[in-house]
Amino acid sequence: MSVRVPTFDEIHDAAARIAPHAMVTPVLRHASLDALAGAELHFKCENLQRGGAFKFRGACNAVWSLTEDEARCGVVTHSSGNHGNALALAAATRGMAAHVVVPEGAVRAKLEAIEQAGATLHRCAATQAAREAAAAEVQRTTGAVMVHPYADTRVMAGQGTVVLELLRQSGTLDAIITPVGGGGLLSGCAIAAHGLAPEIKMYGAEPSGAADAAQSLAQGARIEQFVPNTVCDGLRALIGESNLLALREHRVEVITVSDEETVAAMKWLWRTLKLTVEVSSATVFAAILRQREHFAGRRVGVVLTGGNVDLDALPW
Amino acid sequence: MSVRVPTFDEIHDAAARIAPHAMVTPVLRHASLDALAGAELHFKCENLQRGGAFKFRGACNAVWSLTEDEARCGVVTHSSGNHGNALALAAATRGMAAHVVVPEGAVRAKLEAIEQAGATLHRCAATQAAREAAAAEVQRTTGAVMVHPYADTRVMAGQGTVVLELLRQSGTLDAIITPVGGGGLLSGCAIAAHGLAPEIKMYGAEPSGAADAAQSLAQGARIEQFVPNTVCDGLRALIGESNLLALREHRVEVITVSDEETVAAMKWLWRTLKLTVEVSSATVFAAILRQREHFAGRRVGVVLTGGNVDLDALPW
């Protein structure tokens, strides 16, 4: 798969394209979390985004980038949940069909939301290969346009709008951290951040049980075989080729955290910020607590990516 | 206890007094909750207030209303949790001591927060009489000023600032609903709302296991003996005399809801708004769903009062 990364201008265009549909999410601060981290934390609450995750931005930009002709047969994707839901919601804003291939093990609450949004579910095994094969099959039989969850220029551009908004809301930041799974968010955010302020240091937070991005950066080439083992259901995808290139180009540092640290961080965020953030989102706060030296005394943008949680199966 | 209700001007003064310390909390909307209720719901997120509850407003107004002389020996109150925490935090903003009498059965997370804020805890039995006796004893031995959780003019004025803010954020509303326990919030909000727009219909939401406000309104006199039995730990207090008078004067209607309805509503709010609201807060949404006819097609302000939850003891 060869996909280019978006330009800064494409991220600006995406912001204009999604503005009628996406929410401007609030940025929250909390004195006791600042004290805990020894830093000034600006939490960008994408769990309050439409569909409960930042994914709506990328999906919405992709859907509204299509020509009338391309839009006719709908869109298809594979997703552990949030991107599928986002694509279903985005397709609905344009009256289009959406097909979502979902791997086994996806969070039930996310699947229900996708169906409620009016999309058709197609189930497959939990491997990357099975996801891509099933999506290709749907594409072949329906004529739907593939909107990949992260290795898609339009999607990356949409996710990058998170940082345009955050910097407008919080002013100058020294560093920004987002979770990293496939890398759509992190690459889009890095391009957006450095388009505005090249001195911002970008970080990714990755579960140690799905640390293919960290390992790929360390060994200088993309790891293509990796069986993820993490409670962070939203971060099990392998990083995309173009996403990895963007991370390297923007000198993004990836911090790995254990699931135990992430679940503890999730509980802190719930208890203190009064937000339901999903476990994948909590990696960022776990990373800040684990590597305090990177963040101490700095103004840090912290992207809370989603809030779609199965309330009957909390991880503590 | 004879306490007068605040004037509209006193609520305005309170807003100015607490502005340096309190948060302007966001108002959230959600299409699917609107659809569920058939109304336009404007959720005022006081769970995001300092200390995790609206109570900081009233406590802060009381603390900063004291003269230097009055402030010298600190403040005392009795509280199932949120008011105690709020008073502890508010006292800290003025460098004052705070004593909090806590009834048995209070939520552990709330007690920990009170101690963290630097207050001294005094335990007592869970009855209204025991609370008041223990607080009087602390007052006698320390010289601290009593700041009652709801039967206090300064406290009611502080709580009323919720509505000044909400109406500034949301524009005209047809109705506003808040939970009712002791009635400090609801009475303050009714005075604030009608000071700005006399046509706003005010509602209270009360657990059927603590429906002393509803019964007091129905029988025309305050019920003084009532043993509450509800999962809503923040709404077990009996309504205050002056609070009840204000409810009557402002033609406030109280809707009672079962704990089962409230817990279901709480889960809806968590799942959809991505906010951790405590069970007492969810009574308002339960009331809207139970008596849809009052709210259908209207613009409704919905005060989510707090988010201090014991995450290891969720009620579902």
Image (cartoon, coloured by chain):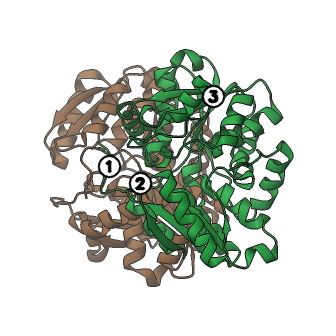
Chain colours: A green, B brown
Three-letter amino acid code at the position of disc 1: Leu
Distance from disc 3 to disc 1, alpha carbons, whole Å, reads 28 Å
Q: Nearer the viewer, mark 2 or mark 3?
A: 2
Q: To which chain does the residue with label 3 belong?
A: A
Residue, disc 1: A314
Q: To which chain does the residue with label 2 belong?
A: A
Identify the image quadrant of residue B227: bottom left
- For the residues tagged 2 and 3, is the chain the same? yes
Quadrant housing the C terminus of chain B: bottom left
Residue, disc 2: A309
Q: Residues within 10 Å of mark 3 (few under 14, many from 20)?
A: many
Three-letter amino acid code at the position of disc 2: Val
Three-letter amino acid code at the position of disc 3: Val
Q: Nearer the viewer, residue B147 or B45?
A: B45
Q: Nearer the viewer, mark 3 or mark 1?
A: 1
Distance from disc 2 to disc 3, alpha carbons, whole Å, reads 25 Å
Q: Residue at x 42, y 42 (%)?
A: A227
Residue, disc 3: A300
Q: Secondary structure at mark 1?
A: loop
> Is mark 1 in CB contact (under 8 Å) with mark 2?
yes
Q: Nearer the viewer, residue B310 or B68?
A: B310
Q: Is residue B253 left or right of residue A155?
A: left
Determine whether B52 is above or below B226 in the image: above
Q: Is residue A20 left or right of residue A310?
A: right
| Residue B65 seen from this side | no
> Is mark 2 in CB contact (under 8 Å) with mark 3?
no
